Amino acid sequence: MENLFLSCANGAQINKLIEDSGLNVYPFSVNSKGNSVYFMINCTQEDMLVVYGEDCANFDGEGAEADGIEYKICPLNHHNALELKKAFPFTAPIRVLGKKRSFGLGDRLGIATPGHIRLFKEYDAYPVFSQQSIRELNLTQRTYEDVLDVATFYTFRDGYKDGYGADGDHLKTEADIEYALSLGFTMITLDSSEHIKVGVEALTAEELDKRVTLTDEYRQRYLNKKFDLEGSIVEFDEDTLKRTVLIYQDAIAYTTHIYNKYLASGKYDCDFEISIDETATPTTPEQHFFVANELTLSGVSFQTVAPRFCGEFQKGVDYIGDIAQFERELIVHAAIARHFGYKLSIHSGSDKFATFKLIGKYTGGRFHVKTAGTNWLEAMRAVAQINPGLYREVHKYALSRFDDARKFYHVTTDLTKIPDVDTLEDDKLPWLFTLNDARQLIHITYGYILTDKDENGNYVFRDKLYTLWRENEAVYADMLYNHIGKHLSLLYSGFEE
């Protein structure tokens, strides 16, 4: 810590004050602005921001003076996050989908960013540290303000200055979109699944004719034409075109409306991602081409599209399905994205290790991949490793809440395949996180684990868990560095060869 502040204004005095007080300063957090010096300290229960000099008047906190220098010790609240972003713009999110590579990091707990920062200092992909859906906010009882503030304070604390994104993920309603945009989110992922027709593939030709009539524009645009996409041919017969129109025309109209109302004017400095993956039926290359073409003709500017790939991209487990078919279709999906000038986006990307090298290869290293639940699973694996007794309690509670949780997620979990935790030795509990069924059990019950209260109004597990994670931050950061690192290593191996 010696001479840490000497390059700053009043550095010698501040350095002596810190040494005398015994404050535990995060070395990468030391920054100066004009005559003011900022840094963060590690207190027993929480981190705090310290501001020395004239800028301390802008912050909430406990003021003091030492040797003629005014300073404040400031809590990590929303007001102080806003002031910190004004002082140091590198702590504010930027648009990242226009970069070659970007990677979403849904942090349900608000404590994963240190491990992510350590990893992304080694890669040129741009991280999206702030990425949450409204469903996740509701299940964890967090707010978008909190999601943004966590990233601001951690990027400042750990000295990450390369730029990160903030994604209002899987937003469906105008109210939710307005909420995210008003706070400065730099990416909106529009989930139009409620406007995508289901069951169309099962319609007979007669039923189909009753529900859709092709316009002359559609006929002229698509019928009897072959679209050559880097050697892959996309073409539509009348039946395929009718079904595609019926499935997606309402979603295209809704997407166009959202774009024109919120993004076309340029009022918000924000990327636009089109999500058509939250459906039961895979997106064929023909359907992907149709959606992209119609949106482009409608004047919609978008940076990524997330199709629903063949096979299963279930939460927190590897790819389930025919990997050869996935590869064949991925080639065309990637070519479509290049044809229209956007990046392919891979949702539910957590732990899809069988696909990553192929994704890296066929996108040419130009992709957006989203992860979320795997960061939570690593946090719970840390619990199993550090406090086996607490983990056993959480595991049993998750079993009791599983039927409630599965209403929110598509999973094929078989609880009978999960060993009874009471039959396992303590050192075997982390092994559960190698089993798909056990992973999905913990993955989808996070909301109940984090927010359920007992009859006295106290959290059943939340406080105990956060205390454990706070005391073992380095352990969790190491786990994330290694686990998310495996994702990136495989993705990069596909295009670096």
Image (cartoon, grey):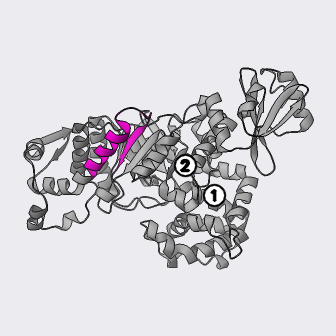
Q: Where residue 273 is drawn, which disc sits there?
A: none
Q: Visible in this render: residue 160?
A: no
Residue located at (57% from left, 77% from top): 400
Q: Earlier in the sequence, mark 2 or mark 1?
A: 2
The quarter of the rendered structure image containing the C terminus is: top left
Q: Is 261 on the left or on the right of 233, as rendered?
A: right
* Quadrant assignment, res 303: top left
Instruction: Give x and y (percent) for residue 31.
Output: 71, 28
Q: Where is residue 244 shown, x and y percent of the image?
A: 19, 54
Q: Which of labels 2 and 1 is toward the front?
A: 2
Q: Secondary structure at mark 1?
A: helix
Residue 152, placed above or below residue 478: above
- Regarding residue 77, the answer to whether it shows in the image is yes
- When asked about the image quadrant of residue 432, the answer is bottom right
Q: Is residue 204 a member of the stretch shown in magenta?
A: no
Give the magenta-colored segment's residue range: 251-276
Q: Is residue 210 left or right of residue 57?
A: left
Is 15 situated above or below 356? above
Is residue 268 highlighted in magenta? yes
At numbered mark 2, what does the secondary structure look like: helix, strand or loop? helix
In front of the other: 389 or 14: 14
- Marker disc for residue 144: 2
Numbered tag placed on residue 379 in the rendering: 1
Number of residues whose C-alpha sits closer than 10 Å to that of mark 2, classed few (under 14), some (14–19) or many (20 or more) = many
Residue 172 x, y percent position in the rendering = 39, 54
Residue at the (62%, 76%) spot, across then down: 396
Q: Is residue 353 left or right of residue 43?
A: left
Q: Find the distance from the CA under tag 2 to the CA under tag 1.
A: 21 Å
The N terminus, quarter of image: top right
Task: Characterize the local packing of mark 1: few (<14), some (14-19) or many (20 or more) Cα atoms within 10 angstroms.
Answer: many
